[in-house]
Amino acid sequence: MSGIARTSATGGEGMLPELLAWSTSLHHDRAFVREDLLGSAAHVTMLARTRLVEVADAQRLREALLSMYADAEAGTLALPDGEEDVHMAVEAELGRRLGAVAGRLHTARSRNDQVALDLRLHVRGQVADALQRTTALVTMLSTRANDERETLIPAYTHRQRAQPTSVGFRLCAWASQLLRGAECLAFGLARADRLPLGSGACSGSSLPIDRNLTSFLLAFSQPTLNALDTVGDRDFALDFAWGATRVMVALSRLSTDVIDYATSEFGYVKLDGRIAAGSSMMPQKKNPDVFELVRGQSARAIGNVMSLLTLVKGLPNGYNRDLQEDRAALLSTGPLLRGALDAVTLALPHVTFDGVKSAAALADGSTQATDLAEALVRKGVPFREAYKAVGALVRRAIDDGIALSQLDPAVASALHPALDAEALRALDPAAAMRAKESIGGTGPRAVAEQIEALRAGAEALAVIASNTPTLANLAARIAAEPLEPA
Amino acid sequence: MSGIARTSATGGEGMLPELLAWSTSLHHDRAFVREDLLGSAAHVTMLARTRLVEVADAQRLREALLSMYADAEAGTLALPDGEEDVHMAVEAELGRRLGAVAGRLHTARSRNDQVALDLRLHVRGQVADALQRTTALVTMLSTRANDERETLIPAYTHRQRAQPTSVGFRLCAWASQLLRGAECLAFGLARADRLPLGSGACSGSSLPIDRNLTSFLLAFSQPTLNALDTVGDRDFALDFAWGATRVMVALSRLSTDVIDYATSEFGYVKLDGRIAAGSSMMPQKKNPDVFELVRGQSARAIGNVMSLLTLVKGLPNGYNRDLQEDRAALLSTGPLLRGALDAVTLALPHVTFDGVKSAAALADGSTQATDLAEALVRKGVPFREAYKAVGALVRRAIDDGIALSQLDPAVASALHPALDAEALRALDPAAAMRAKESIGGTGPRAVAEQIEALRAGAEALAVIASNTPTLANLAARIAAEPLEPA
Amino acid sequence: MSGIARTSATGGEGMLPELLAWSTSLHHDRAFVREDLLGSAAHVTMLARTRLVEVADAQRLREALLSMYADAEAGTLALPDGEEDVHMAVEAELGRRLGAVAGRLHTARSRNDQVALDLRLHVRGQVADALQRTTALVTMLSTRANDERETLIPAYTHRQRAQPTSVGFRLCAWASQLLRGAECLAFGLARADRLPLGSGACSGSSLPIDRNLTSFLLAFSQPTLNALDTVGDRDFALDFAWGATRVMVALSRLSTDVIDYATSEFGYVKLDGRIAAGSSMMPQKKNPDVFELVRGQSARAIGNVMSLLTLVKGLPNGYNRDLQEDRAALLSTGPLLRGALDAVTLALPHVTFDGVKSAAALADGSTQATDLAEALVRKGVPFREAYKAVGALVRRAIDDGIALSQLDPAVASALHPALDAEALRALDPAAAMRAKESIGGTGPRAVAEQIEALRAGAEALAVIASNTPTLANLAARIAAEPLEPA
Amino acid sequence: MSGIARTSATGGEGMLPELLAWSTSLHHDRAFVREDLLGSAAHVTMLARTRLVEVADAQRLREALLSMYADAEAGTLALPDGEEDVHMAVEAELGRRLGAVAGRLHTARSRNDQVALDLRLHVRGQVADALQRTTALVTMLSTRANDERETLIPAYTHRQRAQPTSVGFRLCAWASQLLRGAECLAFGLARADRLPLGSGACSGSSLPIDRNLTSFLLAFSQPTLNALDTVGDRDFALDFAWGATRVMVALSRLSTDVIDYATSEFGYVKLDGRIAAGSSMMPQKKNPDVFELVRGQSARAIGNVMSLLTLVKGLPNGYNRDLQEDRAALLSTGPLLRGALDAVTLALPHVTFDGVKSAAALADGSTQATDLAEALVRKGVPFREAYKAVGALVRRAIDDGIALSQLDPAVASALHPALDAEALRALDPAAAMRAKESIGGTGPRAVAEQIEALRAGAEALAVIASNTPTLANLAARIAAEPLEPA
């Protein structure tokens, strides 16, 4: 049966059924059947307008295609099995509905430019959706950051406690990396924005097609530049996979932090039972499964990038069937990213910071030694002298076996007169945190500015996402377009 | 509903249903439900023998598990949806069939060692199967090589015609790389050969379990060494993915050669319509889709390796939920490899070498210049002198604008007396090809030895593959094992 | 000695010398010593202006740093060995020149933000340089395309001859992919454009530093958003590696085409001896080494991307020493890309298209069957009917065993009246090629538009590249900046 | 100058000097000049024995080559710059020493099989060395494990405290994964064990060469199977990179554990100042730089694997110059692995376990709930009942807000009579740890067996490593071989 399908498409003798079954991409391509239908509806509109198909035929074709699109949206579209790909399956169904006129759709089109169109429309939709979700997460983190501007937590370098910061500052760090990931997505969105249709098999057409019209109908900014390049081009898939990977890597780093904070040893966050369950024997144990899974999934995103890069490296230009193997990586990327973003977005409200625990980690004062030195500098002590004095103080505390914060002020001022009570206040982690108001610092004003910038950045990208035409937009635009040639 | 499932497993309050649905691995895990059932059947046998479960209970459990296994083999096993993973789904079904006794299965086991078992059994089966197919392909190529020992074809370096060889020799080159791939698979098979069950959650058990017995029942050579290592170990998955990738890369190189040979420009092979179809407009065009797809699929295999490596890199020891994300890469590897091996195995008989066309590429003699020089050396001319003489001859032919093979013998012997008619016979590509009888060379005797070695190598590995226990073997072994403690 | 270096930096007891030698990044970091010096010169200028260092000290420091920068430019700067990294080596040399005042430089800075600065400055320079070269290559290809607008060559799909096109069109295809690569570089350039300095170890500073001033002095558009994010961020390295990989992949595909065209079998291009040499025995053989090496180097670029992605995946936020292992991938990327771009740019003028040979591949007319059908459509024959008529003609030619172009016109017009002499002119490859004037098509007007668009695109990016500040620009800007506080 | 070098090698007109400089691999190839010299010495010995070179000439050549080898060992060998590769550089130097006779070496050899030989010899040496070091580290960890069999530490799942184990058990887990890595190296060693020399350019030789003799002289077990395959084969490089990556990934996981344990929060290990230094302001802070760097370096190893896989994927068989780009990945792998192994081996003795701190993490008894249930089972309580009783006890402790270990025994026995004082002893972490004596468990006897197995495994592989012939072995063997033909 598959053999028949193939034969009807290509006129050749039948391929071995096992090979046809193995080589079909239909199971993958169902993911973009709606895109395929709208692409055809736009194409036939253009064909009518350029007198390449008669208006009456175009009318029937467009109506049938839009009706199949509506069915697909409703989940009721049945496509015949056993076709080589989604294009053939759509055509077969169209033939079933309309008869021979279905064949008119072929005019000035090949499966090479058709699949390039479907994939770009798919990518455009996936990227816009992911961009929306990523920016929403950035905004959520920003809001949360505002709530936690005074909650103390150590910042770490080399996984060692380094300096007193606020949880709000830390949330802004996560949001900053995510925002960069969102910017990569937005770049990917721009890269998908060219109409491939009209490239034909590889060199365009001698018929008077109007690619600008098709481009308008499908809401692309312009047609692609060169037909030969277009049919062999999967750069837009690479750009999508790259942006997705960047967001996933940002999520993986956030996840590592949450997993660490949720250990008994750190104890900086509590996970509630809506996102984490213990065992019957250890109900108090809350496993950070959500964050572990997200971190693990970032490895899949990386594998997808690698798969796509290796696929196209060294490939001859023009269409090669190798390109069909973009499907597994390309089509899994959207759901993978969406799943991870949603999981983190759902889970984070169930992650509570335990400010008492994290503040306690700063109590001995050792993480504030630099702050103390800077306090002396602010009082006018030369830099070197300030650091020397604090260095001596630190060693004295170690020698005495007590915490820096517990040293007798008299001992301190004996070491250097500027080490007075006011200066020693810098050992208070909250004071130290608040003092760092340099741009990008952990001080509350600096963090407020970061929150503002993050929100503005997220908002700007969210606008781009929400301005991206949806399939429903396209369907409406196509349906409204006159068919009669001017 | 998912929430209930989770709760019953863990006693905790319910996880958000969206997160449960997102985090479940059940859709993936169905791929190894049979392995899970046999693992449980072996486990309960061991529990009975070590008096940890009563014989009567064990009897009922084992029978139910083996019956579910038979259902799974028959494709009739229905597992409840909405469970967190295949282990919970199996237990739920077992509970449905047997009631509370189903819970006994938990004794001295955790999902951490259970999934490690299932995956290893899956890998063992997949590797053995792939090894069988790879060795069969090596053997097929060897047989084909024997038929083509006298068919001339240029060997290429830098994609330039380099030396006269036989098609048989070229087929042996493909087979050699595939055989190395098969050796990687065999290494992977050996690496999967250790029983993880009995590792518990991460540190073994204080109960008197008998891992050697379970190991015997599941036909592993021995239990794993260290429980903590075992539950966090996916090295066997890496070894599998690596072996698979190596075979896929070998197939990708073979594919590039076939694709090139099938061009109009090379024309060294013809693809028949059973494996390649043209278009209605260009029926004479035969596209090498099968080989393009295989080459493209090798990129997916590489992506899978990368995904798995990145997954485990830097992961804390012990079980981390990240590991669940091994599924997509691990479970797709077997079918990917099997599909590509079958496609190439099916397609190659429909690829015919056109010896006339490939011999013609050697006709002008230029590729035999080195052979001519070696012919002089064989006649006793010192190496340098021989090469100088042939170099002069080559330049003379170029100056005269004729092919080396068409130079007047008198001109040749004037350049060097040893360049007589007998020596010039080395310009005949067939003679030149036949003369290279060094080990590994393209001469017919040398190729015959290669064929012999390839067959022997393939046979040795095929034996390993066919000696690998199947699930049916395990089921029989487990069913036959007494339950009564000694 | 290394131990001493370390001790003087950190006050701790000495690290094992073997570990110090192993862990130093000095050999790598020499690549960005100039960036480090200018970063310090900008920093000390800011410190003076914010009264954190006295003007006189700042004056001496800045002069010494700019003098060392001049030495480094001249290749005469000697740095002491045995230091942990370039920052310590620079400070040691500065100490040698100026004495204790060298230590002032430490104020409000850490090695974490310093290395982030150096790497960004390095990346900015590398990207701008690569962007310049990539756009120049696009322009060169465009010019060449203009010369070859009438040279015929088959376009390929599935590596089979598909349609008649011009070499100019093919060159535009290469240029289009390269231009997309260049756009990725430009994106990377924008991503590097934020000043990390002032982030301190991880949380900013309590001193009244002025990051906007430093940002201005180093010609960044603004400071980074969040200090904790900044010190652990290597996204700019990922963006750079990604853009570079994209250009390399574009070059790899161009290379495959050239390598194929340069075979005896295709013969569409000749490589002259300035870029390819044969052997003494086969002087007529010209190996396409340049293009093979470039294709091979694209694999290194891909490996670099993978290495960087895996490096940061799952890493805790903040600075971790893991990040030092960005060096091999990051620092090799610039030279790799520059080398490949220069090699292709140098080599292409020595690659000559043999239009006679490539036109001959289109002579039998079979690749023009679609063009003939479109010609009928243009004459008013309905699409289906046109294709049916040409299909019949093709089969007839096959049955008669002659080329489509050699069929008797009478036979043709007997099959369909529209298949007259005028229509059959579409079988002429030049006519067929010229007729495809759809946007992006191979017709001369369409190609002329492509050339125009490519040039404009390249020009726009070249402007961005040439507007990127050089190190010399920065040095001048810093030297000109007053030191006195307002 | 480079042009001259090239010309003298190939007789062609000169390549552009910039391209020659860019395309040379000489800077990389210096890494295997000794291998190249010994390969030539073996080759000329064979040539003499097969009468292809006169004994007197062979004598001079072999002596000169072995003398150059001795110079290279001593670090005094100067090779001329400006040659295309190391083979040409060696020949040029040989020519300088001996005159025209140097050219005899060319007989029955090409640079294609020569570089394949050099790389295999390099890989063999690197792998043997790495195997030695890896097994030594396994042995060191085993010894350490023996010392720490009674030191308590929690095992983790999901990064949550899970069960009481010994540090010795944890060390065995690290060692187990490393041992698997070592097994991959050993597999790689076996894969490099075939002589490529004698394959010529791609199809062997018509001269009566004796590959078995060369194989013996260079201590390979046999010649490669097929010449065409051999010159395009880099599978041995892949096997090496793979084994190295596996060891690096094992080290990365060990490193993550050490980094976590070294945090203030875990505090399970102390790093002394010989391997970690704090800052002058925070001398008590010890950064785990060594382990961070090793973890980071594992990403480079992964990038190398990816680079090599992508390099060969889809490459036409036979030699393609692309293969030269194996160098960066191949040659950096040995030093990378050796450096990381040495660093960890040096550092671990300076990592001290703080058993008091890690035992304290088990003190509240919650991690021993499962052990308590198993204790009841051992007393004869049915499994379900035991778990139910302990579950109730756990909930009671939680309700009472006290640790499980602090519950009044009377309360316990009221819940279930078997929960008596003896049973409750299972809450003692040491008792719980000691009780897990299943194979692979954390009990001291089980760990002793693991140590034994690890030592035996390491020893077996160390023997393989130390039996691998060194270059010095080869030099002696070659020098001792008679030159006269039989």
Image: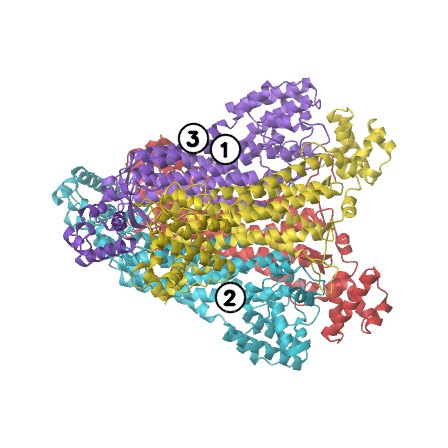
Chain colours: A cyan, B yellow, C red, D purple
Instruction: Name the kind of residue labelled 2 in the image.
Output: Arg
Residue C187 is left or right of residue A346, and the answer is right
Mark carried by residue A124 = 2
Which residue is identified by label 1? D126
Residue B278 is left or right of residue A462, and the answer is right
Q: CA distance from mark 1 to mark 3?
A: 18 Å
State whether residue A311 is above or below residue B467. Answer: below
Residue at (63, 71) in percent of width and height: A91
* Of marks 1 and 3, the one in the foreground: 3
Q: CA distance from mark 3 to mark 2?
A: 58 Å
Q: Residues within 10 Å of mark 1 (few under 14, many from 20)?
A: many
Q: Residues within 10 Å of mark 2 (few under 14, many from 20)?
A: many
Percent across and percent down for residue C236 are: 44, 52
Find numbered disc 1 in the image and state the secondary structure of the residue it sits on: helix
Q: Residues within 10 Å of mark 3 (few under 14, many from 20)?
A: some
Q: Is residue C280 visible?
A: yes
Percent across and percent down for residue A24 are: 60, 62
Question: Which of pointers 1 and 3 lies earlier in the amino acid sequence?
Answer: 1
Q: Chain of mark 1?
A: D
Instruction: Name the kind of residue labelled 1 in the image.
Output: Gln
Which residue is identified by label 3? D459
Q: Chain of mark 3?
A: D
Residue at (56, 22) in percent of width and height: D475
Percent across and percent down for residue C108 are: 30, 47
Judge by depth and name the residue closer to the eye, D8 or A383: D8
Find numbered disc 2 in the image and state the secondary structure of the residue it sits on: helix
Find numbered disc 3 in the image and state the secondary structure of the residue it sits on: helix
State whether residue C92 is above or below residue D105. Answer: below
Residue A50 is left or right of residue D183, and the answer is right
The answer to whether tags 1 and 3 share a subunit is yes
